[in-house]
Image (tube, rainbow, N blue to C red):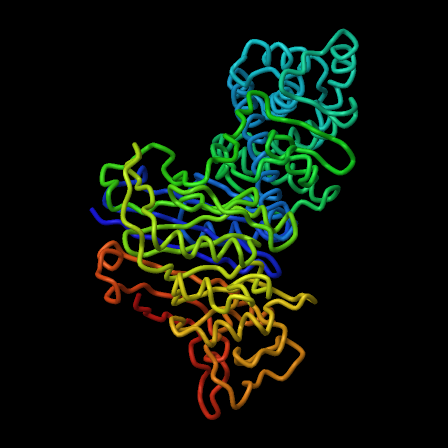
Amino acid sequence: MAWQLDIHVLDVGQGQSVLVVASDAAAGAGATRTLLIDGGHQQSAPDIRRGIAAAGVDRVDVMISTNYDVDHLGGLIGLLRADNAWQLADYVAAAAVAAAVPHAASTSDFHVAAAAAAIALLRGVPATDVPRINSIVNLMLLSVPPMANDVVRAGFAMNETEDAINGWISTGMPLGATLARTVQQRLNYAHAVAVTAGQWLALPQAGITAKAAEALTWMLCATAQIPMVSTEGLFRNTRVIDIGNLPAASPWWPLALAGAVETVAGTRVTAPGFVARPYGFPALGTELLWAGGAPANAATAPVAVMVSGRRRAWQGPNPSAAVNADTPSNNASIGVVVRFNNFAFMTCGDLPHDGEDALGAALTTHPLPTAAGGGATAPAPTRIAAYTCGHHGASTATSNPLVPQAFLNSATPVTPIISCGANLYPHPHGQTTARLQAAVSVAAFYLTNCRHARLEVPYSPGPGVPAVPQQGHPQKGRIAGDNGGPGGHAGDISLQVTQAASQAAAGAGQYSVSYWDQALAAPVPGGAPAPGAVTNIVNF
């Protein structure tokens, strides 16, 4: 058995999102753990879903929002809201299947059953309460006349329930875990999912769930600008971590955590029986990926450790260090180090230079926890081989300008990564790219996008400006993807480390960095375009 670590810095425009996958193929699905750190803006949710699908994982074990800024939290809100809609649709599908069983001879009955399932949802009736659902079906069957098509029949069946719903509400309708603002809003939800579930009731439950979720999400998109994305229940049991100050977050965030499916118009429904996702802010130094459930070969497994948050930076057995160099929001950013034997990767949201400087020294000095739990530790790595530059390459991070190269000298990174998009800040700042260029340890630094001319970055800035190299200056910068151009190549940057490589002696280890290089894909005079996919082998 051998572990593998894959780290994907996903292109989410002006934002950041990192997907971490630790896997041991020989040990089966139980030996795979996934960690999603940040989600860009809400409209980035489909891009993150694409990245998760490309990684081949079927669940996300841990989700972290490093801070509450919209370019970190927004996509996570979009994903959880979409997942809540999926769970709601799955409940309807289960109830529809249960209600349809006694009425399998009649297509019309199927649609009545689907409508009844939606009503059961609104009442908070469990999908397993077949007698209650069937009693609703039987009452509705008495008044369903012959109709032109399945959709009309489903709509009629739904409309027949309005009086019953009003009656239930007037006598104290038992809502259970379900809540909406008005009777009509409840009916709108029920009607949308009932019609769809009725049309597809001959499918297995999973198929009904998919169709009902699609209809429900389309309705939500029209009123709340939710990205159209199907999660297929990826986040049903995800552990969620943030800085723990919900009043300071977007109001959509606590609703998403609570399982609510809500639009800007105020409609809110939660699937009956929804189980809240584990949520909290762990202590600095806590291992996050395995959460105490150690795999069989834990001693060599990758781990993820919480190293900053709430304006403090981990210092091993010593008291944590204060982080004060930037705004309160940025200072509070959660930081995570992913450790795989002798390989280490760090990502800290918008953490400023004093937090990074403190971590660079501590992480290369003090032992870190292992997946075995119980206080077991492994020696400190000699370097942080790769990391995402704080605050999208802003001048406030990646070494204190008053203490030149402090973080870069202690961490000695080989592969810095800057996640940014079109912006006016400007990110990345020229001071940051100059520091990276000057750092002896840096072999190359990678950007998901670069819209500002930087001497150290070839072919910058982006679309609308001639893509010519900056001349007469050393260049360690590499732009991934087509820089937001029409080619459709995202600027994802993927790192892969094998167990054997992670255990090699300092300087003898290797990992790969894969990305799309648009410069290599440019047409060659007199020949075909060269392939733009690049994989670089990096020593650490």
Quadrant in the rendering for residue 106: top right
Name the quadrant containing residue 413: bottom left
In the image, residue 364 sits, relative to residue 477, either above or below, namely: above
| Residue found 65% across the figure and 81% down from its top | 465
392, 99: nearer the viewer: 392
Q: Residue 500 occupies which quadrant of the picture? A: bottom left
Q: Name the residue: 69% across, 33% down.
A: 192
Task: Give coordinates of residue 70: x percent, y percent.
Answer: 65, 50
Q: Which residue is drawn at 76% across and 28% down?
A: 185
Q: Measured along the vertical axis of the image, is residue 211 above or below residue 499?
A: above
Of 282 and 289, the residue lying toward us: 282
Q: Where is residue 275 in the image (x, y as percent from the top left)?
A: 53, 24
| 520 w.r.t. 94: above or below | below
For this orientation, the residue located farthest to the top is 171
* Residue 88 percent across, percent down from the top left: 59, 29
Q: Position of residue 355 (x, y in %)?
A: 51, 53
Q: Which of 28 and 429 is in front in this view?
A: 429
Q: How many marks?
A: 0
